[in-house]
Amino acid sequence: MSHSAAPIITVQQHILQDQQRFPGSSGEFSWLLSGITMATKLIQAKVRRAGLNDMLGAKGEINVQGEIQQKLDVYSNEVLIQCLSARESIGVLASEEDERPLLVHQGSEQARYAVVFDPLDGSSNIDVNVSVGTTFSILRRPEGVGLDDPQKWVLQPGAKQIAAGYVVYGSSTILVYSVGNGVHGFTLDPSVGAYILSHPNMRMPEQGKYYSVNEAYRDNFPPRYQQYLDRLRNGTLGHAYASRYIGSMVADFHRTLLKGGVFLYPPTAENPDGKLRLLYEANPVAFLAEQAGGTAIDGTRRVLDIQPESIHQRTPLVVGSRVELADFERFVLEPETPQAVASE
Ligand code: P6P
């Protein structure tokens, strides 16, 4: 008898298939990732009912970012720490919500991974029901580094990530992750509580039709960035671009991954080093962008090559399709010459 139904592949099955990439890891990696998927299922259940269970609004405390902590931020952070602390292969956790890294499984020889995460990115949008997300980045403990120096576990260039991804809590809940062999998307089926493969081998289109930036800060962008945006609007790349900006990085990047185009958070007067955080915003999306055929720079260099100096350091970010980023690098990074200026 032939079975015509399309195969249902859960994220656990997919991770086990990827498992082969980690020689010697006896399923510990898939057990680690299941800590993230479990936590995000609990988070999405609260996000979906935020208005009903008194989870909207600020908790009133100020977090390490100096931002008013939303109740869902706090809940999401606690759930991720709890779920991940149950994975003995993890030695260090670093969160957007906590100033310093958290040591877990102190002294355990099995503790060889660090997980860096933003439990609820874009949380200022929660009260107005705009998509928010969880980002994560997984790093191996560097050779010879013990638990007495947790900073060294996480202050590694993004190119050292062994896995990274996000969950976007939008019209549906979608997990997108990579372990270095392509990008795969899974949609949560809430009726069974399973992430089902819905976007195998995601590829970022060579070129898109949207640019995504907060235009309110345009006058503060470096002039060449302003001129670059004008080029996109004026059809220099073959068509006039439209603007899409949600103000929630995970949602803006997810659209860019699916539709192509460019998402950028340039240096501004208020944030001369950019607003987005290197370790748990720029690095995960840069890893995914490159795995999907796109490009991610900080305005001058590859994001994944940046050696972090501190856990919460910020970076400018320009990430998106090959065509838009090649034009950015040619137009913005090359010194102005009379000929180049004339051709604009
Ligand atoms: P702005 C959310 O607070 C966040 O960190 C990112 O998710 C988002 O891309 C950015 O800030 C939005 O910043 O200055 O445009 O409101």
Image: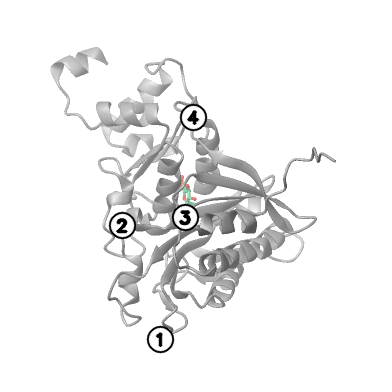
| Picture disc at residue 107 | 1
Amino acid residing under circle 3:
Ala
Locate residue 50 relative to residue 162 in the image: left or right.
right
**Residue at 20%, 18% in the rendered image:** 340
Amino acid residing under circle 1:
Gly
Element type at mark 2: loop
Res 114 → quadrant: bottom left
Residue 226 x, y percent position in the rendering: 33, 29
Please state the total of marks drawn on the protein image.
4
Residue 53 x, y percent position in the rendering: 75, 66
**For mark 4, does the 10 Å Cα neighbourhood hold few (<14), some (14 to 19), or many (20 or more) residues?**
some
**For mark 1, does the 10 Å Cα neighbourhood hold few (<14), some (14 to 19), or many (20 or more) residues?**
few
**Residue at 59%, 41% in the rendered image:** 200
| Picture disc at residue 220 | none
3D distance between C-alphas at marks 3 and 2: 13 Å
Which residue ends up furthest to the right in the rendered image? Answer: 1
Circles 1, 3 touching at the beta carbon (< 8 Å): no
Residue assigned mark 3: 164
Amino acid residing under circle 2:
Pro
Residue assigned mark 2: 157
Q: Nearer the viewer, residue 271 or 327?
A: 327
Circles 4, 1 touching at the beta carbon (< 8 Å): no
